[in-house]
Image (cartoon, rainbow, N blue to C red):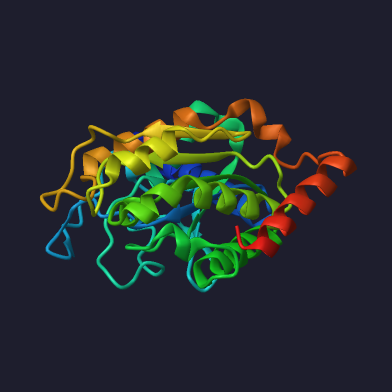
Amino acid sequence: MQPLQYPTTTMLMLFFYSCLCITSTTNLANADAGIKSIFLLAGQSNMAGRGGVINDKWDGYVPPQSSPNPAILRLSADLNWQPATEPLHRDIDYFRACGVGPGLAFANSLLQIDPNIGVIGLVPCAVGGTNISQWARGGHLYNQLLQRATAAVEGGGTVKGLLWYQGESDTVTREDAESYKRRSERFFDHVRLDLQLPTLPIIQVALASGAGSYVEKVREAQLGMWLVNLRTVDAKGLGLEPDGLHLTTPSQVILGEMLAQAFPQAHHSSVRAVTSKASRMHRNFVTQFFDYIGF
C-alpha cells in the first residue's frame, strides 16, 4: 500500500495551521500555568472605550492594532480568563455602549516592544461618567478594582501596572477640579498599599477633553503629579468623536501605543519589591493619619 501523498499546498496549509494551533495552545497553557503579566485598566469612559460609538451604537470596526492575539487575555465580569476581544469593557461598563479602547492596542504594542513579557492579562475596571471621589477607598468602584485584581493573580501571575484614564467628570465644578490632584494621589497611594505593591507602575492619561469648563485645571493637576513610578501621557490633541468628549478609534490606537511606550521597562523586576520596615511603618502611619482626619 502506497503512503498517502498530499499536494504541496495542502501540506503547507497543514503545517502553518499546526504551528498556529501549537502557538495558541502554548500561550493558553502558559496563561493557565500563571505566566501572566497583569494590567489593571481603570477610570471612566475613555478607558472603557467609546471609539466607534455614535448615538450609543458601536460600529463594530476593530483596527489591526486592536486585533485579538493568543498572548492577550481579559478577565471577564465573572472573573474568568478568556481571549481578549473588543470591546474589552462590554460586561463591566454595561450601562452604555462600549467600543474600542486603548487596552488591546497597548497590549499588542507592548508585546512588540518586549516579546519576553509573556502572556498579558488585561483586567477591565473602568466605568463611564465616574468622578474621582467615586473611586475613593471603601467605595464600590475601589472595592471592585481590588476584588478583580486579587482574582486576577489567584491563578498566578503578577500585576505589572495600572493604566488610568479619568477626570472628565471632575471638570464640571471648580471644587472637584481643585481637589483632583489630592484625591488622585490618595487613590494611587491606597491602591498600592492595599495591593501590597508599593512601587506599582501607574500610567495615567492627561485629559483630551472634559464634561465641563475646568479641563485645564484638571490637566494641570495630572501633569503636576510626581510620584514614584508614575508616568503621564498627554492625550491632548487626539481626535474626538462628534460628541467632543470621547476619543475616536484611531485616537484610541495611538493612545494605546503611547501607553506601551510609557510603561517603565526598568521597573519590571521591582513591582514585587518590598520597602524597608521603617518605610512601610511610615507610609502606613501617614495613610492612617490622613484617613483619621478625613483628608
Quarter of the image holding residue 217?
Answer: top left
Q: Is residue 248 above or below residue 33?
A: above
Horizontally, residue 249 falls left or right of residue 84, namely left
Q: Position of residue 53 (x, y in %)?
A: 18, 57
Point out the image quarter for the C terminus. bottom right
Quarter of the image holding residue 156?
Answer: bottom right
Q: Position of residue 235 (x, y in %)?
A: 31, 36
Horizontally, residue 190 falls left or right of residue 278, namely left
Q: In this view of the protein, can residue 12 be seen by the observer?
A: no
Q: Nearer the viewer, residue 12 or 220?
A: 220
Q: Nearer the viewer, residue 179 or 21?
A: 179
Kindly identify the residue that appears in the image at 64 percent across and 42 percent down. Answer: 200
Q: Position of residue 186 (x, y in %)?
A: 58, 51
Q: Position of residue 62 (x, y in %)?
A: 25, 49
Q: Nearer the viewer, residue 294 or 160?
A: 294
Kindly identify the residue that appears in the image at 50 percent across and 54 percent down. Answer: 73
Q: Is residue 112 above or below residue 47?
A: above
Kindly identify the residue that appears in the image at 26 percent across and 69 percent down. Answer: 96
Q: Nearer the viewer, residue 53 or 13?
A: 53
